[in-house]
């Protein structure tokens, strides 16, 4: 291994041409420590699916507790062991469950699993590059993520339990091991894992940005990029700017926990005894956390914006409506996402004037968000819609995003948020707009690009079954939560039966829990379909969806280097669907205008 | 295997991808320090802030790190004009100055401790802890810079750094200047917000 190994793989290209037919890579180089972006994408995908099931399973456990607070769960003892005492879930373990559910879903599934899979897979393929700018860094990114995963997973099995202070790990709760058992070793491992996670995200993100900027094929100007690439690109920039801030915040928290500093701690009494820490500020942590935290929610949703735009255009057989407006709104959302973080902190006693400023900035985000929604709807309008499984998920994504976005506008008003903060209304909001929507976007991407990833098709019928169960349960779970929230039902409470005001919601809670279990079960259909189709699915053709983007010009199973011959040159934008006068209802990006004279528009005649 | 640049095939930005990558890494480091320094300001504005004198040695350290930037640049220029022995000498010098800087920072910490400004513990105040964090995290990055410098030095001993193979030393120079600039920022920041 020579000096410039953390470097650029031109040799990928040559190696490929030279040894096309005898492989000189052993099993480890090919599947484990691979530097091929397609393999790394699949590694992220498998890891993401694994974590998705873990996170989902945790939520089923705490939904059991919420749905049937009086029941005894002795049947869970074989799985949960000491966490079930006399058939009752340990209250601190309940907190650990919600914490780990949030952490796993937000970071491990919807950040690493989503960006890791689709940015890795699609960026080189759609911009016409042989691989990422640095295959080595890319590989490192996955393996550091893997280490983060191992640490987080181990923390689930600690006798004191994993971290329990919520996915936002607010101090002082998270800083003081005396506070709850989850703030002991569990929290330490949480921080170690997240530090590794951040490094992994930065390595990945740096690579995505460099690749998009530097390695586009001939003719692929920024305004001919598919919207997926724009979305992945901006996601990586958001990550690059916000993850280091979380790193700083976590570092200070580590110092507070282990080195006796007082960045976040001041005047605390535990069991009647005063701690020595003075001068810290817990609100400081919230500022730092949400400076990452809010961009983070867009890191989760932007990639799915891109995926959904692409799938909707392809399956409506129409150009995306307002391509430039789509890019503009992505840019607008990315910019705004850095100046709204304090809307998570309206009740921290901040200056009301400052609150109004953040309220104003927050509500502006509704504008670019609405632009996107209208453009999706306009693309669907009078399209020749093909209801593939991916398309169903894409359309449902739009629906969920609207439902969840509307409640965002309600929460964005500081005076309303004071009532709704930390209730199930917030849970409903972000699970629809982020949780469910991003999952739907991810499923949409998996169903759509499965043929390119594995050379086979997923079963459409099972896809529909999976879709309908998931879609119905998403709404059945989260819609009722709005009512709970408006009634003041607080989030993160282990037991609510002691409050008369909330007892009337017992049925609603059981209902939500049943729907949640239904939704979780439906994912087993997906898992079966996914695994089965990898081995036994119908063989795919090179371009099964008649799509325009470059990845479909590669062989059915693209090798290392992606294109066996030269990389195609790009002549047109990716959305020439149903162009009047064209022979077919799609014209791929690499077809020059000279071959499509019958459909060229006046200004394109010059390009012939 | 010496990897060649994919960028040669179709580089759309005109900058070497690795150099671009380095700039992105620098941006992420800047964001980290932006977080620390803005946290510092916000926290300081809240009061209960211990005021203390900055160690005098910090000024000397600032001069040392500035000097090391000069020698680094001269090493770079020597490489560009294929003056290999001069380049090596300057690289050693830069490395030495880097180590001296670290030792100086260490002495700065000792001075703080002897003035009862502690990182953690019962009597610590965030103002002191911030001081240690800012200098400490910066020192950590200096160490990464020194590691990279050591790597360039090894390469130069193997005659791998010369006018036709400038990438390594270019990246090293950019990173080293950045670390110097970062220190300058931190020093001025600490002087002003004191
Ligand atoms: C129209 C745009 C949106 C507005 C105005 C908005 C507003 C808000 C507000 C004010 C809160 C704080 C509620 C509280 O804690 O009291 C909140 C929470 C949240 N929002 Fe949004 N939001 C919008 C869109 C989104 C999107 C697109 C996502 C994710 C993709 C998202 C994810 C979240 C999450 C995860 C939380 C809760 C975090 C937590 O406390 O655990 N929001 N939103
Ligand atoms: Cu937010």
Image (cartoon, rainbow, N blue to C red):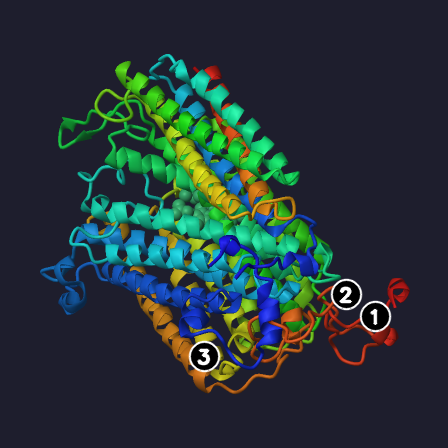
Residue A152 point in image, percent of width and height: 30, 55
Identify which residue is drawn at 15% across, 58% down: A83
Q: Is tag 2's residue or tag 3's residue first in the polypeptide sequence?
A: 3
Quick one: SS at disc 2? loop
Inter-mark Cα distance, 2 to 3:
37 Å
Tell me where residue A552 sits by quadrant.
bottom right
Inter-mark Cα distance, 1 to 3:
42 Å
Identify which residue is drawn at 43% across, 71% down: A31
Residue A572, numbered label: 2
Quick one: SS at disc 3? helix
Tell me where residue A568 sits by quadrant.
bottom right
Residue A42 point in image, percent of width and height: 46, 69
Circle 3 is placed at which residue position? A465
The chain ID associated with circle 3 is A
Residue B54 point in image, percent of width and height: 39, 15
Q: Quadrant of the C terminus of chain A?
A: bottom right
Q: In this rendering, is residue A377 above or below A359?
A: below
Inter-mark Cα distance, 2 to 1:
8 Å
Q: Is tag 1's residue or tag 3's residue first in the polypeptide sequence?
A: 3
Ligand 1 within 8 Å, label 3 CB: no
Circle 1 is placed at which residue position? A593
The chain ID associated with circle 1 is A
Marks 2,1: beta carbons within 8 A:
yes
């Amino acid at each position: 291994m020579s000096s410039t190994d953390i470097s650029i793989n031109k040799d990928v290209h040559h190696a490929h041409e030279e040894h096309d037919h005898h492989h000189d890579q052993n099993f480890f180089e090919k599947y484990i420590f691979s530097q091929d972006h397609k393999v790394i994408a699949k590694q992220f995908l498998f890891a993401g699916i694994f974590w998705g099931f873990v996170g989902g399973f945790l939520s089923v456990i705490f939904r059991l507790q919420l749905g049937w607070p009086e029941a005894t769960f002795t049947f869970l003892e074989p799985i949960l062991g000491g966490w079930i005492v006399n058939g009752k879930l340990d209250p601190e373990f309940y907190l650990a469950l919600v914490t780990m559910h949030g952490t796993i879903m937000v970071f491990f599934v919807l950040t690493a699993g989503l960006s890791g899979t689709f940015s890795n897979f699609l960026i080189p393929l759609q911009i016409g590059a042989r691989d990422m700018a640095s295959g080595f860094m890319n590989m490192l990114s996955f393996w550091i993520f893997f280490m983060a995963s191992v640490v987080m997973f181990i923390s689930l099995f600690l006798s004191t339990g994993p971290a329990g202070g919520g996915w936002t790990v607010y101090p002082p709760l998270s800083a003081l091991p005396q506070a709850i058992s989850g703030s002991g070793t569990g929290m330490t491992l949480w921080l170690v894992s997240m530090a590794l996670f951040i490094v992994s995200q930065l390595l990945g993100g740096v690579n995505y940005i460099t690749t998009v900027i530097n390695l586009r094929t001939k003719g692929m100007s920024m305004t001919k990029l598919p919207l997926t690439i724009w979305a992945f690109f901006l996601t990586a920039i958001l990550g690059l700017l916000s993850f280091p801030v979380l790193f700083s915040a976590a570092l200070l928290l580590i110092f507070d926990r282990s080195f006796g500093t007082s960045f976040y701690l001041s005047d605390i009494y535990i069991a009647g005894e005063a701690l020595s820490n003075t001068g810290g500020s817990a609100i400081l942590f919230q500022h730092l956390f949400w400076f990452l935290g809010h961009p983070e929610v867009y890191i989760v949703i932007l990639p799915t914006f891109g995926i959904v735009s692409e799938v909707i255009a392809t399956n409506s057989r129409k150009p995306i409506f307002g391509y430039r407006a789509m890019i503009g709104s992505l840019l607008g959302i990315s910019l705004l996402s850095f100046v709204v973080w304090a809307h998570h902190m309206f009740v921290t006693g901040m200056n009301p004037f400052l609150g109004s400023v953040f309220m104003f900035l927050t509500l502006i985000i509704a504008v670019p968000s609405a632009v996107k929604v209208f453009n999706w709807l306009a693309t669907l309008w009078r399209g020749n819609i093909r209801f593939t499984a991916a398309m169903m998920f894409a359309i449902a994504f739009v629906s969920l995003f609207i439902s969840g976005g509307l409640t965002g506008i309600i929460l964005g008003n500081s005076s309303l948020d004071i009532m709704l903060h930390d209730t199930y209304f917030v849970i409903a909001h972000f699970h629809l707009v982020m949780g469910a929507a991003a999952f739907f976007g991810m499923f949409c991407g998996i169903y759509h690009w499965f043929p390119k990833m594995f050379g086979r098709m997923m079963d459409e019928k099972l896809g529909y079954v999976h879709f309908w169960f998931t879609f119905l349960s998403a709404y059945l779970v989260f819609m009722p939560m709005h009512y709970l929230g408006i009634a003041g039902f607080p989030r993160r409470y282990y037991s609510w039966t002691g409050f008369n005001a909330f007892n009337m919601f017992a049925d609603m809670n059981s209902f939500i829990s049943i729907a949640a279990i239904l939704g979780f079960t439906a994912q087993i259909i997906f898992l079966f379909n996914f695994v089965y189709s990898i081995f036994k699915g119908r063989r795919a053709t090179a371009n099964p969806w008649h799509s325009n983007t470059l990845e479909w010009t590669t062989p059915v199973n693209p090798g290392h280097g992606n294109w066996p011959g030269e990389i195609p040159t790009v002549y047109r934008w990716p959305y020439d669907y149903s162009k009047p006068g064209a022979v077919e209802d799609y014209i791929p990006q690499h077809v020059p205008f000279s071959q499509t004279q019958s459909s060229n528009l006046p200004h394109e005649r010059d390009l012939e | 295997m010496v990897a060649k640049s994919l960028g040669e095939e179709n580089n759309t930005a005109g900058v070497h991808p690795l150099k671009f990558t380095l700039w992105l890494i620098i941006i992420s480091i800047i964001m980290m320090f932006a977080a620390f320094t803005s946290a510092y300001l916000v926290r300081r504005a809240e009061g209960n802030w211990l005021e203390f004198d900055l160690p005098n040695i910090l000024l000397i350290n600032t001069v040392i790190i500035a000097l090391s930037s000069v020698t680094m640049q001269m090493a770079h220029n020597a490489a560009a004009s294929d003056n290999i022995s001069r380049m090596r000498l300057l690289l050693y010098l830069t490395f030495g100055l880097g180590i001296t800087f670290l030792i100086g920072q260490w002495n700065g910490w000792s001075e703080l401790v002897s003035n009862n400004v502690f990182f953690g513990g019962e009597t610590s105040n965030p103002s002191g802890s911030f001081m240690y964090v800012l200098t400490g995290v910066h020192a950590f990055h200096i160490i990464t810079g020194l590691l990279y410098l050591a790597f360039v030095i090894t390469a130069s001993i193997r005659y791998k750094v010369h006018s036709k193979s400038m990438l390594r030393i270019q990246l090293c120079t950019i990173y080293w200047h950045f670390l110097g600039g970062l220190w300058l920022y931190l020093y001025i920041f600490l002087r002003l917000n004191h």
